[in-house]
């Protein structure tokens, strides 16, 4: 328990020191009244590639559950420096495409370095905004948000644009730390329940498909357009 408490305090410090913008009291979701979390700034990029993340999140297992196929087009929304992007790119293969989207140019510079390190030719960097990920319409088979959705300051607008970017049979997948589990050592505003996610996402034109609970700390929550 001491280890978990220390971890929680470390994350608290990181969220405050590395946030892209300050939170205001009115930054709550209009449906669930959930406090919207800080966006991690580029100064926290090293945290995204910490060695412990493998054991804490099982990224390869998470991607395996997505059922990706060669040739697919995937959007990694809030890609950061590409921790998931390069894994997705290898799964969809050279004939597939991965859009690595982020709102911070410095994160996209880190993404470019990751792409170069892994010798990838099928990743396209996209600079989005707080309101729009700037993805091509009707182009994406799967949009993946890994510990990102809870930071959207304009969640309804973002979801509307993501829906437009998905193909008719496209999927939206959220990985979110489980708020139902107090043992998950993450700040409360960086955790969500399945009920919260569904209450916020479904009104924006998405149909709940299923939840997969195989990861140590996170939900995998799948919607269809």
Image (tube, rainbow, N blue to C red):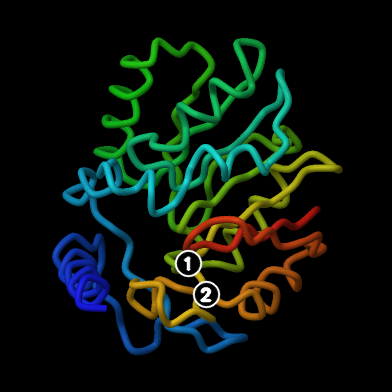
Q: Position of residue 222 (x, y in %)?
A: 71, 56
Q: Position of residue 140 (x, y in %)?
A: 70, 35
Q: Is residue 106 above or below residue 174?
A: above
Q: Is residue 69 above or below residue 131?
A: above
> Residue, x 57% and y 85% (percent of image)?
30
Left or right of residue 113: residue 30: right
Q: Position of residue 196 (x, y in %)?
A: 61, 79
Please, what secondary structure does the residue beneath circle 2 have? Answer: strand
Quarter of the view holding residue 210:
bottom right
Query: Disc number at residue 177?
Result: 1
Q: How many C-alpha atoms fall within 10 Å of the one at disc 1: few (<14), some, or many (≥20)?
A: many
Alpha carbon of mark 1 to alpha carbon of mark 2: how far? 6 Å
Query: Disc number at residue 214?
Result: none
Where's the N terminus, which quadrant?
Answer: bottom left
Q: Which residue carries the number 2 mark?
A: 192
Q: Nearer the viewer, residue 221 or 123?
A: 221
Q: Nearer the viewer, residue 29 or 211?
A: 211
> Residue, x 31% and y 16% (percent of image)?
117
């Amino acid at each position: 328990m001491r280890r978990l408490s220390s971890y929680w305090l470390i994350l608290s410090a990181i969220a405050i020191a590395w946030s892209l913008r300050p939170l205001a009291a009115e930054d709550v979701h209009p449906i669930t009244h959930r406090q919207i979390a800080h966006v991690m700034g580029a100064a926290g990029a090293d945290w995204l590639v910490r060695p412990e993340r493998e054991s804490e999140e099982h990224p390869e297992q998470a991607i395996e559950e997505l059922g990706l196929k060669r040739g697919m087009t995937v959007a990694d929304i809030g890609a950061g420096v590409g921790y998931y992007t390069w894994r997705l790119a290898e799964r969809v293969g050279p004939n597939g495409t991965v859009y690595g989207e982020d709102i911070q140019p410095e994160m996209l510079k880190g993404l470019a370095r990751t792409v170069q390190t892994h010798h990838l030719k099928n990743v396209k960097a996209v600079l989005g905004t707080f309101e729009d990920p700037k993805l091509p319409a009707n182009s994406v088979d799967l949009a993946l948000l890994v510990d990102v959705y809870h930071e959207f300051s304009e969640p309804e607008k973002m979801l509307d644009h993501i829906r437009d970017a998905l193909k008719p049979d496209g999927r939206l997948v959220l990985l979110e730390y489980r708020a139902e589990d107090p043992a998950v050592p993450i700040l409360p505003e960086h955790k969500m329940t399945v009920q919260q996610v569904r209450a916020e996402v479904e009104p924006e034109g998405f149909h709940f498909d299923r939840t997969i609970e195989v990861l140590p700390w996170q939900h995998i929550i799948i919607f269809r357009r």
